[in-house]
Image: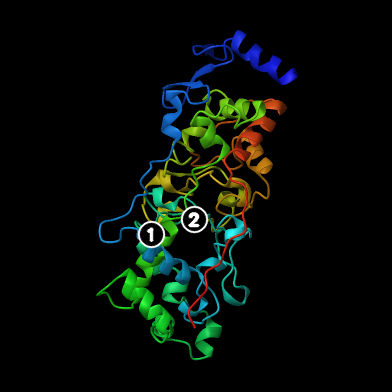
Amino acid sequence: MKRLAAAALMVVCGVGTTTAGVGALSITDSDGQTVTLEAGHPSLKKWLLPAAIPAPEGNKMTPERVALGEQLFFEPRLSVHGQTSCASCHAPERGWADGLPLSMRLMGERMTRNSPTIVNVAFNSLHMWDGRNATLEQQALSSQSMTGSLNAGAKEQGITNGELGIERIRQLGGYLDAFAKAYPGEPVSKETASKAIAVFERSLVSRNTPFDRWVGGDAGAMTPAQLNGLRVFLDPGKGNCAACHSAPNFTDNGFHNIGLKQWGEANADSGRFKQKAVEAMKGAFRTPTLREIAYTAPYFHDGSAARLQDVVEHYVRGGEVRSNLSPNLKPLTLTELERADLLAFMQALNTPYKPYDFPRLPR
């Protein structure tokens, strides 16, 4: 009752105006568009992902390519040292991330960035935290599992052949058949394997969350707390979250310096600036999707936020280090209820967890 009364008070006090019946609140979002917070309202349709999954010409999605790509994604023998796979850093049970603040290579060698989810990467225009890869095919080819980034221990063991992983794959009849079906006439090569992995990654799409169902017209799909959290999320005068986490994939595919403590440290990671030497890109990193966000802790490119609550509090403070800060980032004035409801809304961006059926790998 208290929450319903609070929602009614918001309407009466002019937070929004009712335009679609009792309890339907309309606000102007960060794009200057009027959005009516009513299940199935046409103003919300921009938040629904396109029906067609984007794919480049020459590497369209087929069942055979998805199946091959899935096997290669989980295949440690594809790596030069034969010990790690794509799934080592992108595990299905961890929201297709790895659950570590900073990812690790073989033998515990710590990397410098957090492993992001690959859910909905088909809708990203650039890949990696700094946008160094223009396509998923390029990203797969340049990853450790494909190129076999060799540490000193591997070199000491005489592992210096960057083709060693794919050479193992060529010796397995099951893979030879799978490549022939997926890419007839193409060689069993790192390049073709990268294409298959990219197809599989594009198949990992999240579009049936409570939020999606609510946007589609199911009024009971989200709770009153989540609806109020959506208001906070969209309102430029409150959370202003949608300024960067925009429709439909909850990312603008842009790069922003959000004022993390890491940016104030000596030898701080300069992020996108290494790829695009523009002042605004110093310390800027790609905006991650918020879809399936509950499964992908810890957060930020440096894994410095252990919980979603920590993420919200970071934005409420307006960041920690203010040099070169994104203009979208300003301290927020949110009540405890609004912060709690914003967190509740982000829970509506997740699908119920289901155990993953791992593929059988050729022997």
Residue holding disc 2: 118
Above or below: residue 228 compared with residue 80: above
Residue holding disc 1: 136
Above or below: residue 173 compared with residue 89: below
- Crowd around label 1: few <14 · some 14–19 · many ≥20 (10 Å): many
For this orientation, the residue located farthest to the bottom is 158
At x 57%, y 40%, the residue is 349
At x 52%, y 73%, the residue is 360
At x 50%, y 47%, the residue is 206
Residues 108 and 83: in front is 83
For this orientation, the residue located farthest to the right is 2
- Say which amino acid is labelled 2: Ile
- Mark 1 or mark 2, which is nearer the start of the sequence? 2
* Residue 139 seen from this side: no
- Say which amino acid is labelled 1: Leu
Q: Position of residue 358 (x, y in %)?
A: 56, 67
Above or below: residue 315 compared with residue 52: above
Residues 113 and 4: in front is 4
At x 63%, y 32%, the residue is 342
Q: Is the image coloured rainbow, by chain, by secondary structure, or in one colour?
A: rainbow
- Crowd around label 2: few <14 · some 14–19 · many ≥20 (10 Å): many
Q: Position of residue 287 (x, y in %)?
A: 48, 45
Residue 146 circle label: none
Above or below: residue 124 compared with residue 33: below
State the CA–CA distance, disc 2 to disc 1: 10 Å
Can you tell which quarter of the image residue 72 is in?
bottom left
Element on which disc 1 rests:
helix
Residues 14 and 354: in front is 354
